[in-house]
Image (tube, rainbow, N blue to C red):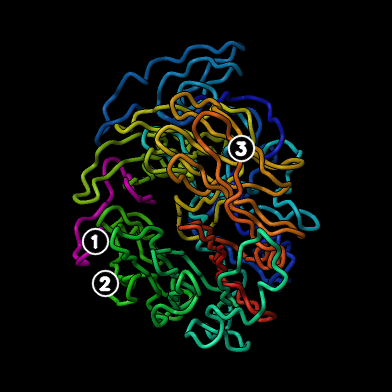
């Protein structure tokens, strides 16, 4: 795929939305909900090496060449290759510059080459924010989540607090804008929960399947049922993480503050007793194993500086604890103050700030370490699933500073391929790991790129669609969470991205991973934003957000020929639209005809009960 650089913006920001957005006071909030936002709180200053400061206006201006500086695949040390050849001049008389992988750029339709040799287009495919990885200012008066609607495109990495380069491609990486880990808006005096009324934590005594709040009262014909609804446990005034949401054939499992809850998917009654950890939960594996095992990380102590180094395996079917371990610090400046947990096959990858350690998911046995390699290359982020992807920062502070992307063998840690990115480009997100689809940004030049890699790590295509895309991406401070975007999906040959809603309904665009060109698009069936969630056979499953007078809905879109009209699978009731629309930040899933919605962050606001999880079905 190619993206014409230096193309004047077409309007909109085109970057994934940061979630939650930030209140004027500095306290994160969801601008779409009508609920009372958290009280004004002063945000903490960014840590050393944290997110960059907001750049001057101009994001979304003409794209510049991409970041791929050297060809892949290869294994360090890097060897010179055919991409060091001199660049050819572009059609507008300005010599193209090297892309992120070092390949000679060819002139594109807009006069400037993209990171893969063809120019990217401005104004789409990027996370939404004030800078790569920065939060999005709330829109006036609620409503649309996009404050830049109708304005020049801003290249922002909603997922990009820090940028990294992916295997041979220029990618914009979020320095940890993680939907599960949000900056604390205000330091609490202690970690004790705020004093609000006790909440039903799922012991089966109150809200399981009985609908005590009459949420289904007044439900209209054709509307789905509220299967169950859970309020969150009390959290300290500084807030708390509520990462992960795992759905099995029988159980929906959710983490919040210090506890892990399990609810029957049909009636919400507890399937096993809630697990309480000694300290705050600080990370969780996004994935689960084929036999429904996950890993939770919690802090070693109650202080703000306590390390996130205690990990515990959990069986989702039974709630039983398996093996546990303490994550050791790496070298100098490589601590476990925060970690990310990624599962690939039967391997758990625990990422620190500059390295990673792999464990066997069945036994807890340490398998291997991913450490510094080559010329000061430090692994800083991992993405998992059917493939294990590593992003490293190399030569920091030197004239050769750049990012590199690698695929690792989960069982042995062996490097399968490496792609080097040109200085200035960083990998912000992995929209997919199989196939590998990377979102990259260049903070200094205010540019972005979406690139797809082949199975050997070489460049397959770059997105070449003149559109503003807007997946919703979380954000964090101490970690760079590559897989924190909702509203993006991919299969073997197609990438599905939501457009930014400028006026009226938005659309989902299907993009060929072979050419980077648009294949087709379909419009939201309502005036509310539609987000792709997952592929189900030959259909794309999408979520249409609720409005003030209608619940959200789940729709399917056929991906093959013969039209791409949406078909309604589930219409959520109007009576719970306010609850559905009022989650502070959210995780979404549609499994076996049921739709699940949960928060990923507790604000600690004691003015009202916070929402934890909501399930709809027929």
> Which numbered mark, 2 or 3, is in the foreground of this view?
3
Provide the residue designation for mark 2. Answer: 325
Q: In the rendered image of this protein, does residue 20 appear above or below residue 86?
A: below
- In this rendering, position of residue 372 left or right of residue 259: left
Provide the residue designation for mark 1. Answer: 359
Q: Nearer the viewer, residue 156 or 242?
A: 242
**Mark 2: secondary structure:** strand
Q: Position of residue 357 (x, y in %)?
A: 27, 58
Crowding around mark 3 (Cα neighbors within 10 Å: few <14, some 14 to 19, many 20+) is: some
Asked if the residue under mark 1 is in contact with the one under mark 2, i.e. CB atoms within 8 Å, the reply is: yes
Can residue 576 be seen at all in this image of the molecule?
A: yes
Residue 565's tag is 3
C-alpha gap between disc 2 and disc 3: 49 Å
**Mark 3: secondary structure:** loop
Q: Earlier in the sequence, mark 2 or mark 1?
A: 2
Range shown magenta: 358-386
């Amino acid at each position: 795929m190619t993206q014409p650089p230096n193309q004047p913006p077409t309007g909109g920001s085109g970057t994934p939305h940061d979630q939650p957005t930030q209140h004027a006071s500095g306290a994160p909030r969801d601008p779409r909900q009508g609920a009372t936002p958290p009280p004004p709180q002063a945000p903490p200053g960014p840590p050393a090496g944290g997110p960059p400061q907001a750049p001057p206006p101009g994001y979304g201006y003409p794209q510049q060449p991409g970041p791929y500086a050297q060809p892949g695949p290869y294994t360090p040390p890097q060897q010179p290759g055919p991409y060091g050849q001199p660049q050819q001049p572009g059609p507008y008389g300005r010599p193209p510059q090297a892309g992120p992988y070092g390949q000679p750029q060819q002139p594109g339709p807009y006069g400037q080459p993209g990171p893969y040799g063809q120019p990217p287009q401005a104004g789409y495919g990027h996370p939404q924010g004030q800078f790569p990885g920065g939060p999005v200012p709330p829109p006036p008066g609620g409503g649309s989540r996009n404050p830049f609607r109708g304005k020049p495109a801003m290249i922002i990495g909603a997922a990009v607090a820090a940028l990294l380069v992916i295997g041979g491609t220029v990618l914009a990486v979020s320095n940890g804008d993680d939907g599960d880990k949000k900056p604390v808006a205000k330091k609490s005096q202690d970690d004790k929960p705020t004093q609000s009324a006790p909440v039903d934590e799922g012991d089966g005594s109150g809200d399981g399947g009985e609908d005590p709040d009459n949420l289904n009262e007044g439900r209209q014909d054709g509307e789905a049922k509220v299967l169950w609804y859970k309020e969150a446990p009390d959290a300290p005034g500084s807030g708390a993480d509520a990462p992960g949401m795992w759905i099995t054939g029988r159980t929906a499992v959710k983490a919040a503050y210090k506890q892990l809850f399990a609810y029957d998917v049909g009636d919400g009654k507890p399937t096993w007793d809630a697990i309480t950890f000694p300290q705050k939960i600080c990370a969780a594996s996004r994935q689960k194993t084929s036999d429904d095992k996950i890993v939770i990380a919690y802090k070693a102590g109650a202080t703000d500086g306590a390390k996130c180094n205690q990990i515990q395996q959990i069986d989702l079917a039974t709630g039983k604890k398996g093996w546990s371990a303490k994550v050791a610090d790496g070298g100098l400046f490589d601590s476990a103050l925060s970690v990310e947990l990624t599962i690939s096959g039967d391997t758990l990858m625990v990422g620190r700030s500059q390295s990673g350690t792999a464990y066997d998911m069945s036994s807890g046995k340490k398998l291997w370490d991913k450490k510094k390699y080559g010329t000061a290359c430090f692994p800083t982020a991992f993405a998992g699933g059917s493939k294990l992807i590593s992003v490293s920062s190399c030569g920091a502070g030197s004239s050769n500073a750049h990012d590199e992307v690698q695929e690792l063998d989960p069982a042995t840690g062996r490097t399968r391929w490496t792609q080097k990115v040109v200085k200035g480009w960083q990998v912000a997100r992995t929209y997919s790991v199989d196939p590998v689809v990377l979102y990259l940004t260049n903070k200094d030049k205010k540019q972005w790129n979406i690139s797809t890699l082949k199975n050997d790590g070489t460049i397959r295509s770059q997105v070449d669609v003149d559109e503003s895309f807007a997946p919703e991406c979380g954000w964090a401070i101490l970690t760079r969470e590559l897989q924190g975007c909702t509203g993006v999906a991919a299969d073997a040959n197609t990438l599905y991205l939501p457009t930014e809603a400028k006026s009226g309904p938005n659309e989902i665009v299907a993009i060929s991973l072979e050419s980077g060109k648009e294949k087709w698009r379909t419009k939201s069936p309502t005036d509310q934003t539609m987000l792709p969630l997952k592929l189900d056979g030959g259909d794309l499953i999408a979520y249409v957000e609720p409005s003030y007078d209608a619940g959200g809905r789940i729709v399917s879109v056929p991906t093959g020929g013969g039209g791409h009209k949406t078909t309604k699978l589930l219409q959520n009731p109007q009576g719970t639209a306010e609850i559905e629309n009022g989650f502070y930040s959210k995780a979404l899933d549609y499994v076996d005809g049921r739709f699940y919605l949960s928060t990923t962050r507790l604000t600690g606001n004691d003015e009202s009960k916070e929402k934890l999880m909501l399930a709809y079905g027929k």
